[in-house]
Image (cartoon, helix red, strand yellow):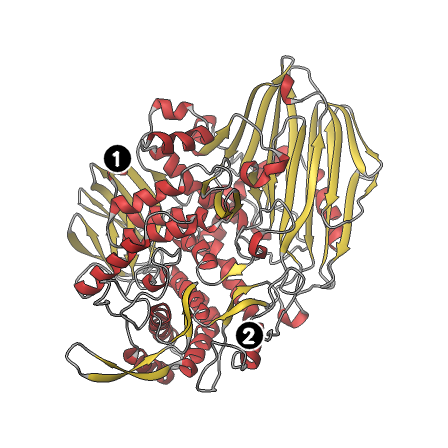
Amino acid sequence: MDHRNTEPRDIRPSRRGFLALAAAAGAASTLGLPTFAASAAPRRPTESPMLAAGEATRNQLWWQAPGSPNSMIEQGLPVGNGRLGALASNDPASEHLTISDATLWTGGLNDTLQDDGQFPYGRDDFGSLTLLATLTVDIPGHDLGVVDNYRRTLDLAQALVSTTYDVDGVSYRRQIFASRPDDVIVLHFSQQGGGSYTGTISLAGTHGESTTADSAGPHASFGASFANGLRYGAAVTARGNGGKVAVTGSSISFTGCRELTVVLSGGTNYAPDPAAGFRDPSVDPQRLARTKVLAAARESVRDLLHTHVADFRPLFEQLGLSLGASSATQRELDTWERVQARWRDNVPDPELEAAYLQFGRYLMISGSRGSLPIGLQGPWLDGNDPDWMGDYHTDVNIQMNYWLADRAGLADCFDAFADYCLAQLPAWTDVTRRLFNSPTNRFRNSSGRIAGWAVAFSTNPYGGSGWWWHPSGNAWLCQNLFEHYEYTQDRAYLAKVYPLLKGAVQFWETRLVTTTVTDASGAAREVLVADSDWSAEHGPQDTKGNTYSQELVWNLFQNYRTATQVLGRDTGYAETVDGLRQRLYLPEVSPTTGWLQEWMSADNLGETTHRHLSPLIGLFPGDRIRPDDSTPQEIVTGATALLTARGMNSFGWANAWRSLCWARLKNAEKAYQLIVNNLRPSTNGSNGTAMNLFDIYETNPGRGIFQIDANLGTPSAIIEMLVYSRPGHVELLPALPAAWAGAGSVSGVGVRGGFVADVSWRNGKVTKATLTSVGGRSTTLVAGGAARQINLKPGESVTLRNL
């Protein structure tokens, strides 16, 4: 059955669609806000956007115990408005929040090389993401020993943390949310049964700042600056219903309040403008924070909550997912008990697995809107010393963070990544010109020529570089940037990022060197290979023609040619570049190991089970290698053998990448097992999932850290198992595991080529599929082993049944 609909759907993974939804919610005035800045008060929604109780429970996680202030990374619940982030403990007697701002960075440009060829990589030179503040609301008499019926909930669809409990027959409730329209974090305390709240509110900086309080409001605030000149500040105010709210020293006290609303804001004077030194001198963060909290506190908490939900829900609801029904026994368990039971009993829990995907989307929306992109931890810290400085690693981590955005109906969340790259481009270009060919750089171009831009393995928001140069990093960043165009078909966006694509191509034009290879018949031919490089992050650092680099450059050159054709630019140069692409050496299968070679050697020169899948980048995120007639079978077999050798047990992000590769190879059970492996409960810092669902990365025995890429990469793998796409081709249920095969559905999946897919299935077969154009016109739809040609105009959709 073929049913066409020319009316655009309400939900679209496109910027225009999101703007329309946000405007309807009254939040359009805040969209695109690049930094902590003054903004007009948002229009409030005229109708309640809140979900009915039954609907809300479908996307709720819940726990029977609060988090400890000493273990916030593993137990605190995250909220965020795209720039501000907080972890909440939800302790009845002492609500504790650790608050971060994505732009609160120490360090600076860091554009010198050490004698060993590395960039300095420390907290004082390269810099680090740090905490902005802590907030504590102490409520004596509400200690856990006297509390009954405790429960805390994270409502993913409405971005709302709630805590309920009873004391002496009185029911107490608190709600915490981070509003983007009002640019504040709100805590609301209420009760039923004749109770009241008495206690203190304390705002503290984490770098030795002095907090001062003022009876006007009342409010408390602090402001300071780092040695690098970055100014920052935060403020808090409170309003009570009944009782009294007053200043006591540097804190705010409240006595006998039937309800209490606490409002916090803060930020820095960071600006994404290299010409201004990444600073906005007109911004006084402390004063601005005071202005924002006092303005928000004049609104009713109902209006603040409704404005926040009206802003958040349209994004969250762009993708729906059901992987089947869990058992009644599973549903009775809280979220942490379910995580433990899933691993202990090895019984599929499809509702938990779907919730894990939605949790990743929740983190993406909460951490990537209108500010800097999500780094290693996003805007969620528990101290000032995050591992690897919480930076932007360019050899998989930041790229993995953004694989989810377009796939999961969050195309607008990708803007933070693209805008970051554009803002850093002048600094990256300058440091490349001056330092890449330095005699101390082991990766320097042997030709002595240089052009375009490159990056280090670690980058910071000031154009700064850390650790070693990473020559292939620019090509990988550009792969993400170009794929966003493939999903959206947004020519204006492609034109915006075109300088990044061209600059990376120019860099590689100067870097490729000629060598001679001999094929199996003994015939010799000249090919182009990447100069001395590292197959991140293992093996020798001085080999030419690494598979990692060759695949990324092949893809970069191909994408660049497409960009020039779409935009009508540099067509002559594009032909030159395509000629280089056709001369690139492409990896072979080792006659020694039977694996796809990682280096131009039949021998394995690194760690067999290494966490990185660098030589398989042509399988995922690239798709030059795919299990169909377009790829020689020996290459697919060699890639499969190498992936098998890498193993099924690694760090969370490495498991996510493995799962994505197995999904591309259509091995559903291996892809699923790796998702299960990431859901295993972390104990004593081991690899796995913490109580709050954050992914834990074991750095040493007994010590684990939070690293967000697995929380975003694993959901990407789930989607890849359900829908695979490349321009001109979309395949439904390519790697559906037995655990999800009974019945399920997914809606709002982004499709490369400019489409959105909705799919329902039963007993492993597609029962209904709808493809909607968001700019695409033609693609081949594959389901159940049959291919169908689909032709649509933008805004049209087609529905097919029983495929």
* Residue drawn at (29%, 76%) of the image: 585
Q: Residue at x 31, y 42 (%)?
A: 673
Instruction: Please identify the quarter of the rendering in which residue 330 is found.
Output: top left
Q: Kindly identify which residue carries mark 2.
A: 117
Asked if residue 550 lies left or right of residue 100, the reply is left
- In this picture, is 710 found above or below 188? below
Q: For the residue labelled by badge 1, is the local secondary structure a helix, a strand or a loop? A: strand
Compared to residue 399, the image places residue 703 above or below, namely: above
On screen, residue 771 versus residue 387, left or right, reads: left
Nearest to viewer (mark 1 / mark 2) = 2
Q: Earlier in the sequence, mark 1 or mark 2?
A: 2
Q: Label 1, label 2: how many angstroms apart (C-alpha)?
A: 56 Å
Check the image and report above or below for 80 versus 305: below
Q: Looking at the image, can residue 50 be seen? A: yes
Residue 188 location (% of width, % of height) = 65, 31
Mark 1 belongs to which amino acid? Ala
Q: Mark 2: few, some, or many residues within 10 Å (few <14, many ≥20)?
A: many
Pick whichever, 322 or 453, lies toward us. 453
The foreground one among 658 and 171 is 658
What's under tag 2, amino acid-wise? Gly
Left or right position of 77 against 359? right
Circle on res. 407: none
Q: Compared to 326, does 689 lie above or below? A: below
Q: Is residue 731 left or right of residue 90?
A: left
Q: Which residue is mark 1?
A: 743
